[in-house]
Amino acid sequence: MASTPPSDTPRLRIATRESPLAMWQAEHVAESLKKRGFQTEIVPLVSKGDTDMRPIDGTRQVGLFTKRIQQALVDDEADVAVHSLKDLPTEPDSRFTLAAVPPRESVLDALVFADDSPHLKEQADAASPLDCLPQGARVGTGSTRRLAQLKQLRPDLDVLPIRGNVQTRLAKLNAGEFDAIVLAHAGILRLEMNDLPHRLFPLEEMIPAPGQGALGIEVRSDDTNAMHAISSLNDAAARLAATAERKVLSELHGGCLAPIACHAKLETSDTGTELCLNAIVMSADGKERLQESARIAVTPDDNDLEVATAHELGTSVANRLREQGADKLISTVRDAH
Ligand SMILES: NCc1[nH]cc(CCC(=O)O)c1CC(=O)O
């Protein structure tokens, strides 16, 4: 744990979007900081991604959810920016430093059913969550990554766009617009929606987005006080995995709209610890799919060395995907918009 801060340390102002999930995440960070003796204050903000309900497409810029929060750092309205890591663009911006990736929540995706859905009860022991859905069922998701994987598993499904925060999406589901929607398991757990009728996709069926289930906490690059406080929240394993995943995305110039899915984790055996990475790139319709996986030995003591190792792993997987034609698949998705 970090050394106890002096009692005259100024409050850390934490900027967040004001959706219930984002607020939970900011409060979670505030709690962790309080436990370490820091004073905090939450600064809720409205982002473009929250007000603009047009389908997310390639015509608009990246960072829909994160730019407003970063602007609060620039304008000195806040000292700390809490993001869902999967919403944070991979392009480095020298004004900000990713000071911590805290311990990661579930990386899985969940298929969520309406409160009165007959499908879930009929298939209580289904092997795949999709076994619960009848032919031609309407599934809501705004993510090309989820759409492509759904279509691979079940070409008959009618995958329809959906926008809005978790509560808005659930309201649309319960209004009968969809038979099911896909949500991140992390959001369900954080919002303690234990009664929500849902089934988890196994990792093999639905590979997550880079950084899914992890938070990314940024500070101004010149703010050594905030940097010191926030770095005490970092989790080395979560950081390594997220670094490798985000490297695949940045190497392929994917952005958050690309049908790229990947998952990294540390595996420890008798012979030592390895960082394992699995990544796929798909066509928009899910008909084509490229897959690569690789592993690399890590010695989780030397942080700088390990970040370089995670970059090496991500780069080698991205290069192999590119050799198979990943760039072409990614550009077909851009052209579709
Ligand atoms: N783009 C929205 C978003 N960003 C992060 C999460 C979930 C939490 C997480 O993955 O950490 C969600 C909602 C969802 O995908 O269901």
Image: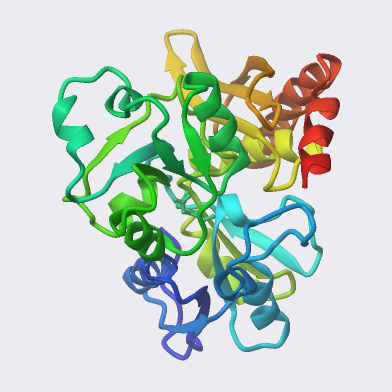
Please state the horizontal and vertical placement of residue 108, each as a whole percent of the image.
Answer: 41, 36
Q: How has the structure been colored for display?
A: rainbow
The part of the image, by quadrant, that contains residue 225 is: bottom right
Residue 216's spot in the image, x, y percent? 56, 57
Most extreme residue toward the front, as rendered?
A: 136
For residue 215, side relative to residue 128 (left or right) = right
Quarter holding the N terminus is: bottom left
Would you identify the image quadrant in which residue 248 lies?
top right
Q: Is residue 301 visible?
A: no
Q: Residue at x 51, y 38 (%)?
A: 159
Residues 306 and 259: in front is 259
Residue at 31% over, 51% down? 188
Q: In this view, does 337 lie above or below 43?
A: above
Residue 229 in view in this figure:
yes
Q: Residue 131: image x %, image y %?
A: 31, 22
Q: Looking at the image, which residue is at 61% across and 72% down?
A: 52
**Vertical relation: 126 (above or below) 19:** above
Residue drawn at point x = 60 percent, y = 40 percent: 210
- Res. 34 image quadrant: bottom left
Relative height, residue 56 to residue 298 (above, below): below
Q: Where is residue 174 in the image (x, y as percent from the top left)?
A: 28, 56
Q: How many labels does the image show?
A: 0
